């Protein structure tokens, strides 16, 4: 993973934001084995629903969206508000590989964003690993 404006940390950021040492721990085992390397060159994606503490969604969205334009290997990173839950955000990520996603977690900008976001996160409601197969990146502001 690397940091691009349209990339944040998605689940990666969310994972670290919880203070867990690994994605599997952060998601209560839901990602057990998820960080195993995929076939070389195979794209990797993750979609996560992050629950902010009451009234903190906007602040969390800013933190998850900031400084994400310089993450190597990030093809797309989207932070979106859940229309049904005023405290929920969806983070959708597409990466060149699982390795790129994993590497992003050690970037200084990502680590800083994680430490700032951690106090605003109530938990993770849902997470799914995907293999991106097509589409277009979201335009940056």
Image (cartoon, grey):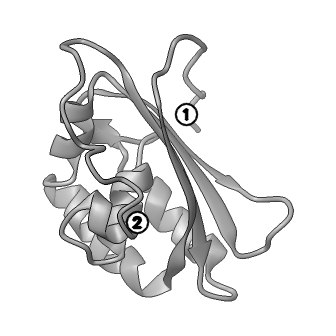
What is the x, y in percent for residue 130? 48, 31
Question: How packed is label 2: few (under 14 Cα within 10 Å), some, or many (20 or more)?
Answer: many
Q: Quadrant of the C terminus?
A: top right
Q: Is residue 12 above or below residue 51?
A: above
Please give the name of the residue rendered at 38% of the width and 80% of the height, measured from the top-left corner: 118
Quadrant position of residue 50:
bottom right
What is the x, y in percent for residue 69? 36, 39
The disc, 1 or 2, on the residue closer to the chain's N-terminal end is: 2
Q: Is residue 55 above or below residue 87?
A: below
Horizontal arrangement in the rendering, residue 24 relative to residue 123 (left or right): left
Q: Nearer the viewer, mark 1 or mark 2?
A: 2
Q: Considering depth in this image, is 68 or 76 the residue closer to the camera?
A: 76
Q: Is residue 83 above or below residue 6?
A: below
Q: Considering depth in this image, is 130 or 120 the residue closer to the camera?
A: 130
Residue 113 seen in the figure: no
Please give the name of the residue rendered at 30% of the width and 53% of the height, measured from the top-left corner: 32
Q: CA distance from mark 1 to mark 2?
A: 29 Å
Horizontal arrangement in the rendering, residue 53 relative to residue 2 (left or right): right
Horizontal arrangement in the rendering, residue 136 relative to residue 81 (left or right): left
Quadrant position of residue 136:
top right
Please give the name of the residue rendered at 24% of the width and 12% of the height, measured from the top-left corner: 41
Please give the name of the residue rendered at 18% of the width and 69% of the height, measured from the top-left corner: 21
Give residue 140's mark. 1
According to the picture, the residue beneath numbered tag 2 turns out to be 27
Badge 1 marks a residue whose secondary structure is loop
Q: Quadrant of the N terminus?
A: top left
Question: How packed is label 1: few (under 14 Cα within 10 Å), some, or many (20 or more)?
Answer: few
Badge 2 marks a residue whose secondary structure is loop
Residue 95 seen in the figure: yes
What is the x, y in percent for residue 15? 35, 64
What is the x, y in percent for residue 108? 15, 59
């Amino acid at each position: 993973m690397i940091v691009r404006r349209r990339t944040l940390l998605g689940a990666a950021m969310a994972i670290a934001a919880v203070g867990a040492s690994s994605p599997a721990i952060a998601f209560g085992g839901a990602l057990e084995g998820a960080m195993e390397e995929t076939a070389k060159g195979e794209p990797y994606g993750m979609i996560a629903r992050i629950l902010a503490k009451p009234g903190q969604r906007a602040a969390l969205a800013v933190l998850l969206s900031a400084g994400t334009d310089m993450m190597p290997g990030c093809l797309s990173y989207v932070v979106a508000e859940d229309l049904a839950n005023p405290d929920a955000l969806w983070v959708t990520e597409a990466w060149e590989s699982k390795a790129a996603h994993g590497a992003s977690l050690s970037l200084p900008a990502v680590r800083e964003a994680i430490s700032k976001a951690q106090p605003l996160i109530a938990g993770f409601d849902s997470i799914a690993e995907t293999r991106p197969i097509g589409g277009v990146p979201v335009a940056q502001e």
